[in-house]
């Protein structure tokens, strides 16, 4: 059994793993609320105990420590990996944000000029020319034969409205490309999509990117940038 001033074997292995994973000794000890003197005493105690056991060709304590150390190191490594992923995801989300500018206000149409009550000609003129009620001669109304039947016209409400901007699409696809397949549903969920809405979104963007070369170039540039962030 360890002496009263020393740490037990599992705590000693845990702190050793954190330091081996890159944690600064002073920070690791401060977080565990262990003073340096107690750490030094624990280190001397357990290393001497394992050395004495090895001198007798016995390794039970060494094997126990090794198992605790490896398990702790795996936990620390996984926590660090998840923390790095979280930082990268935040960076990708920030990179996918775009500034939305408000559309300029449409000026109100000036009110019509009322005729004088006595039937005379008003001296007040309209602020602008009054548009003709008849279309120009060059504009001909469509013939009845050229208008498609109502059944063939798809209502605008039935068309899919994209949920993602092109920057968000690139960020999401970059994360999908950098993640195991089992994590894909969680990635899509973070962008507000389930399997059904993602299928609609994917089809929408495939059509749009296929016909707009400039938009595809913008998407590709953002995708490469976000993927580089995730692969650092």
Image (tube, helix red, strand yellow):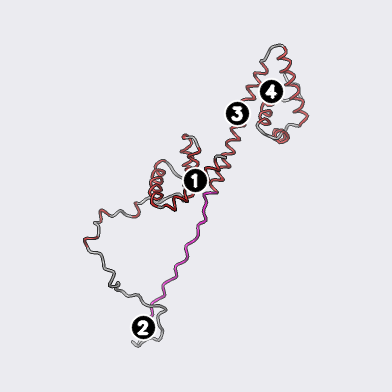
According to the picture, the residue beneath numbered tag 3 turns out to be: 74
How far across and how far down the image is residue 34, in percent?
A: 73, 31
In this rendering, which labeled residue sits more in front, label 1 or label 3? Answer: 1
How far across and how far down the image is residue 65, in percent?
A: 66, 21
Residue 103 or 180: which is nearer the viewer? Answer: 180
Quadrant the C terminus occupies:
top right
According to the picture, the residue beneath numbered tag 1 turns out to be: 223
Secondary element type, mark 1: helix
The image's mark for residue 34 is none
Q: Are marks 1 and 4 in contact (CB under 8 Å)?
A: no
According to the picture, the residue beneath numbered tag 2 turns out to be: 115
Picture layout, residue 16 above or below residue 165: above
How far across and how far down the image is residue 69, in percent?
A: 65, 25
What's the magenta bit mostly, secondary-structure-wise? loop
User: Which one is earlier in the sequence, the residue at label 1 or at label 3?
Assistant: 3
Residues rendered magenta in the picture = 95-115
Q: Is residue 123 left or right of residue 228?
A: left
């Amino acid at each position: 059994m360890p002496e009263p001033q020393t740490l037990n074997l599992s705590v000693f292995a845990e702190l050793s793993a954190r330091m081996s994973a890159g944690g600064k000794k002073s920070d690791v000890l401060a977080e565990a609320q262990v003073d340096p003197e107690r750490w030094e005493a624990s280190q001397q105690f357990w290393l001497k105990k394992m050395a004495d056991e090895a001198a007798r060709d016995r390794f039970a304590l060494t094997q126990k420590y090794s198992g605790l150390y490896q398990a702790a190191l795996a936990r620390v490594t996984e926590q660090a990996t998840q923390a790095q992923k979280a930082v990268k995801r935040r960076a990708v989300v920030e990179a996918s944000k775009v500034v939305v500018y408000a559309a300029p206000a449409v000026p109100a149409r000036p009110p019509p000029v009322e005729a004088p009550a006595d039937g005379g000609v008003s001296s007040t003129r309209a602020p602008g020319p009054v548009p003709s009620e008849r279309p120009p001669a060059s504009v001909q109304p469509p013939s009845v034969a050229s208008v498609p039947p109502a059944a063939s016209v798809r209502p605008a409400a039935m068309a899919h409205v994209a949920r993602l901007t092109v920057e968000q699409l690139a960020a999401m696809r970059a994360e999908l490309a950098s993640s195991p397949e089992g994590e894909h549903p969680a990635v899509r969920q973070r962008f507000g999509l389930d399997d059904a809405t993602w299928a609609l979104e994917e089809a929408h963007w495939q059509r749009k990117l296929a016909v707009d070369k400039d938009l595809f170039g913008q998407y590709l540039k953002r995708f490469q940038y976000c993927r580089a962030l995730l692969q650092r």
